[in-house]
Amino acid sequence: MNPSQRVFVLGIDGVPHSLVQRFADAGVMPNMARLMRAGWAAQIDSVLPTVSNVAWACFQTGKNPGKFDIFGFAEVDARLQIRLPNGSHLRSETLEEIASRAGKRVVSLGIPTSYPPRKVNGLVVSGFLAPSLEKGVYPLERLALLKSLGYQLDIDPRRAREDLTFFKRQLLEVFDGRRRAAEALLESEPWDLFIMHVMETDRINHFLWRQWETGDAAEAAFFEDFYRRVDAFVGWLDERLGERDTLAIVSDHGFCSVRAEVQINRWLMREGYLRVQGDPKDMFAAISDDTVAFGLVPGRIHIFRSDAYDRGGVPPQERDKISGELADKLRSWTDPETGQLICKRVLKREEAFSGPYIRHAPDVIVDPHDGYDFKAALTQGEIFTHSPITGMHTYHDASLYLRGRRLTAERRSITDLTRSVLDILGVPVPPDMDSRGVLA
């Protein structure tokens, strides 16, 4: 590849390929329709576990979680204390760092696992996991510009659960600020690699997916209008990029309606694997010493091993037996109302991950059938519950588009884009990457 070529990666969080195709055909996203006719697009897979911080870390590193040691939004340490991993826990060099080391100029805007921002040859603005914009910008001199453009890290998802009117107003504010920042930086910053992550697509899908899918007139109209805004930015971007620049538009997972939230810890309690003896408000510190396994979002099950947890009582040699037993039960678990299987795939950790940090991975991980959104409440109660969240992530149906490039026929995942970006930039690919590339 010609090392003088540039790459712009637009990350549209949680946007399914099937939705892009549907909106392109229906005239909601005419710019995407035009680009897809002229370029190449494909349905791709996400990663396990199917959550945004892990998926974008896979993209940033070109590796599976067993090689960078982050397995979810929340993890539990040996003392059963909850940890919210961020970029400081990412045990790998990132795409931005690899490109910088090769002398490329980088702009990275909003990637979830980029807090705290690492020093690069260019600019990093952290994603929604940062505690504040002030703490998430490198170099700090760019903070004033971002504030003047109305840039915000994210909406307030807690308030959105209570007030959809507030949610919709804030969603537009945050997206418009992010768009203005990207437009200004594209024109003012020198760059070889520009990565822009849009979290608002994931947020609207969580809160309004079912309303759109079932034809709720007001909410469906807002939903489609928002995607028109996204499409308008895509059109603007396509016009501004040079003919030799590569445009990649990628999502990290798909989406579907929630049929029910599945409380995996309540299922483990019912099956006799988990007991809570303390105050559930103390979270995982409240589980009893005779617990065999506990669950984390989404569909991650950890065996309470003596070699992994201070109070764990399960001998390490029992791990394979118990994980196999759990996997067999999960594979045959059905919805009591419909008789439908709940789990599409149930994998042991060695089937899902590889690398030096696999010992920290969940012992069992679930990829559910569409509609079954795995949660991890520790209180007693119903196994199947409901909340204001109407849309959920799916492993299948993520999306990838490349302008001016040809995709290989083999099905790929978001992890595979990393190698292609480096190839286009003319940057050597580190030998420990899993990324296979997506270019023919």
Image: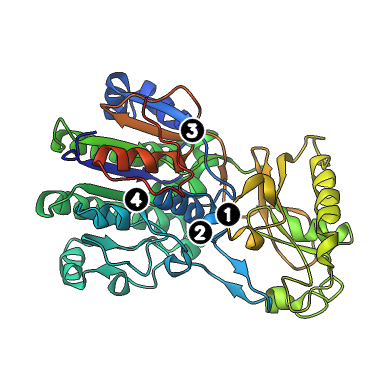
| Location of residue 78 by image quarter | bottom right
Nearer the observer, disc 3 or disc 1?
Answer: 1
Q: Are marks 3 and 2 in contact (CB under 8 Å)?
A: no
The quadrant the N terminus occupies is top left
Q: Residues within 10 Å of mark 4 (few under 14, many from 20)?
A: many
Nearer the observer, disc 3 or disc 4?
Answer: 3
Q: Which residue is mark 2?
A: 68
Residue type at mark 2 is Phe
Residue 372 visible, this angle: yes
Nearer the observer, disc 2 or disc 1?
Answer: 1
- Image coords of residue 87 (percent x, y): 42, 65
Q: Which residue is mark 4?
A: 197
Q: Which residue is mark 3?
A: 412
Q: Which residue is mark 1?
A: 355
Q: Is residue 42 above or below residue 192?
A: above
N-terminal of the pair, mark 3 or mark 2, is 2
